[in-house]
Image (cartoon, grey):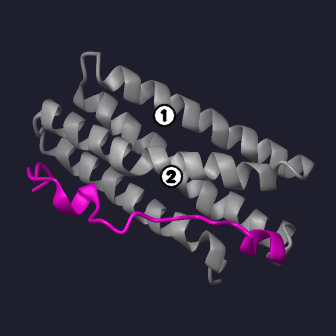
Amino acid sequence: MQRAESLQPLSRQHKSALMTCLLIRKGVSKQAPVAVMTEFLLQCWNKELKDHFGQEETQLLPLLKTTPEGTAYAAAILRDHELWRTAMTHLQQANITHRLLGDLADQLEQHVRYEERIVFPYLEQSVPAASLNQLHLTEDGGVSVCNSFPTKFWE
């Protein structure tokens, strides 16, 4: 089934987030330098994921909160976002390991899959099309970090 047009910008951003996860996992399996992978992940966060989370919180969560089931989905999304924000703060301070980076990639992938497989179909079925069409989700037209990061640690 085709994703509702109004949700497609987020779905495209999810695709980029999944690529981030894949590249981190490849770097972990090759034992790439932790500092390089950390910088990559922080750039993904600052240039892509942070704004993405903000759009979901300001535009999608209010729609979800109009129903009891949607309220539970919104709470799960917000919890994941807060965990990720905390992780990104610690990523700038803590002793980072390959395992931690791999765990962060796993967490991000699970979050994206949850939204794509459960939350978005729920929105498409439960929220009137007119309400979905009022979403004003934006995309950064620039090159993703995955395609522009200077060190190809995953190769």
Three-letter code, disc 1? Trp
Task: Tell me the quarter of the picture where residue 98 sits.
Answer: top left
Q: Compare residues 155 and 130 and report the one nearer the observer.
A: 130
What is the distance, in whole Å, between disc 1 and disc 2 at their CAs? 12 Å
Three-letter code, disc 2? His
Give the side of residue 27 with respect to residue 74, left or right.
left
Name the residue located 52 percent from the left edge and 65 percent from the top edge.
138
Badge 2 is on which residue? Answer: 52
Name the residue located 40 percent from the left edge and 63 percent from the top edge.
140
Relative image position of residue 137 (x, y in whole percent)? 58, 64
Mark 1 in CB contact with mark 2 (< 8 angstroms): no
Looking at the rendering, the stretch of residues picked out in magenta corresponds to: 130-155
Task: Tell me the quarter of the picture where residue 37 sits.
Answer: top left
What secondary structure is the stretch in magenta mostly built from?
Answer: loop
Circle 2 packing at 10 Å, graded few (<14), some (14-19), many (20+), is: some
Circle 1 packing at 10 Å, graded few (<14), some (14-19), many (20+), is: many
Does the stretch in magenta take in 36? no
Does the stretch in magenta take in 132? yes
Q: Earlier in the sequence, mark 1 or mark 2?
A: 2
Image quadrant for the C terminus? bottom left
Front disc: 1 or 2: 2
Note whether 16 is above or below 97 in the view shown: below
Name the residue located 53 percent from the left edge and 54 percent from the top edge.
112
Q: Residue furthest bottom?
A: 2
Give the side of residue 13 with respect to residue 129, left or right.
left
Looking at the rendered structure, the secondary structure element under dot 2 is helix
Name the residue located 73 percent from the left edge and 75 percent from the top edge.
133
Q: Which mark is residue 84?
A: 1
